Amino acid sequence: MTHAANVLRQDHRVDEPQLIARVLAGDRIAGRELYDAHAPRVFRLAFRLTGDAELAGECTQETFIRAFRQLDRFRGDSALSTWLHRITVSVASNGMRKVKRFRAREADLEEAHPIEAAGEAIEPDLRARLAQAIDELPEIYRMTVIMHDLEGYTHSEIGAALGVAEGTCKSRLAIARGKLRAALADFARE
Amino acid sequence: MGMDDDRFERLMRDAAHTYHAPPEPPLDAMWLRIEGEHFEKSARVQRWVPARWMRSTVGIAASLLVGVGIGRYWSDHRAPSPAASAANGRMPFDAAASSARPSSIGPQGNGAPALYQATTTRYLDQTTALLAALPREARAGHADVQFIDQARELLSTTRLLLDSPAASDPKLRTLFDDLELVLAQIARLPAARDRAEMELIKEALEQRDLLPRLRSAVADTPISTDD
């Protein structure tokens, strides 16, 4: 990762307007610096939404290709990251509609790269049931719970990415979590 | 009965690490396609500007494109260099004379083929009509969509003409340059009303004396009798 991209990660507003201007002028080095600063999070989000590394890679590429093409329309009224994530959500949704697949729960657990949180002993069956329940949520609820609970986006960021008001986002999250709890009702009695 | 809150929250915290836990992104591999799609394609489009104009022009511009090809063929085959003429046994004088034949002379005797005369005349007529309508549009405080669309088409044609033998005449070239500036301003007008912008364009028109120069150029352009 370039030095500028590192600086950008520490304070993503530093140098960003200059980088954007350079990208618009065709400076591919500036393009790479912007990409380095934002691609990891874009990829994470795409992977969370799709569950597939190849599809997540395609979504990431498509996000940046679209973003660079439309960069002259970016007015700076939101953070660049928010704008990028809005594109990511749209691209991932389209990608998943075309693919329409979720890998089997067993395959996901084998191929994923789980990091066990310290002190959190979760039964594998319960973990698998939750993952299935998340997969089966209607898309608007699934995206909300993934972005908020799993990726740490604020309601404001999620609202901007999904094109809804913050209040709607909070409401959707509550509904999504209610559905998940209902799906795990069997385990509640244990 | 649902799951208790603490247990559910622990489960969600665990899911943050385990649900579709992302691998390391292949940043370099992904960048290759992005760079190729955006930066290399953009560079190709900028080098090949005529291709972009070709996609957005019809009518006058299409005939201009044919004319460029004819013009190049004409300049290659009808005006041999003195050296080539000498090599072919012809006197340089004959080569110079053949290039000055009246049928090949453009509006100002610049040697542009007759095709350009008809095209240039049509272009000058249409541009005159568009710009003559500008004061009315400015008074209305907005330009309608058709007006702006026509300005865009004429802007494309202007740029093609600038790249053609029609612009070898200095007076016409200067006129085309000034028209390009004004047409570009009109083409960029926003959909919303902007009286101030319209007034600025009208002022530019008057400062450059464009309408009288256009009418003069139309009057100077001979009616071509060539095919």
Image (cartoon, coloured by chain):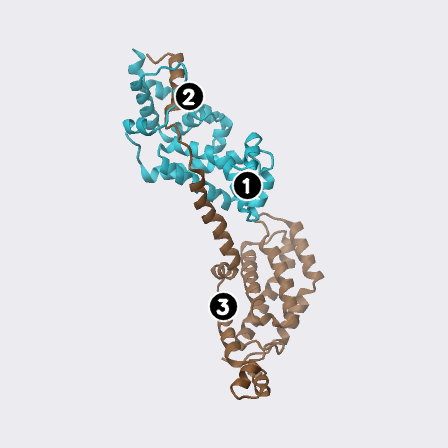
Chain colours: A cyan, B brown
Q: Position of residue B214 (x, y in %)?
A: 64, 68
Q: Which residue is mark 2?
A: A174
Q: CA distance from mark 2 to mark 3?
A: 62 Å
Q: CA distance from mark 3 to mark 1?
A: 36 Å
Q: Which residue type carries mark 2?
A: Ala
Q: Which residue is mark 3?
A: B65
Question: Disc 1 or disc 2, which is closer to the eye?
Answer: 1
Q: Which residue type carries mark 1?
A: Phe
Check chain identity for marks 1 and 2: say if they share one.
Answer: yes
Packing grade of label 2 (10 A; few <14, some 14-19, many >=20) is some
What number is the disc on residue A74? 1
Q: Position of residue A11 (x, y in %)?
A: 58, 31
Disc 1, SS: loop
Disc 3, SS: helix
Packing grade of label 3 (10 A; few <14, some 14-19, many >=20) is some
Whichever of labels 1 and 2 marks the residue nearer the N terminus, that label is: 1
Q: Chain of mark 2?
A: A
Check chain identity for marks 2 and 3: say if they share one.
Answer: no
Question: Does residue B17 lie above or below B188 as drawn?
Answer: above
Q: Position of residue B25 (x, y in %)?
A: 42, 35
Task: Say whether residue B54 is visible.
Answer: yes
The image quadrant of residue A176 is: top left
**Proximity of marks 3 and 1: CB atoms separated by less than 8 Å:** no
Task: Say whether residue B132 is visible.
Answer: no
Q: Residue at x 59, y 52 (%)?
A: B189
Question: Does residue B124 lie above or below B97 as drawn?
Answer: above
Position of residue A118 in the picture relative to residue B109 (left or right)? left
Q: Chain of mark 1?
A: A
Q: Nearer the viewer, residue B170 or A182?
A: B170
Q: Position of residue B3 (x, y in %)?
A: 35, 13
Q: Chain of mark 3?
A: B
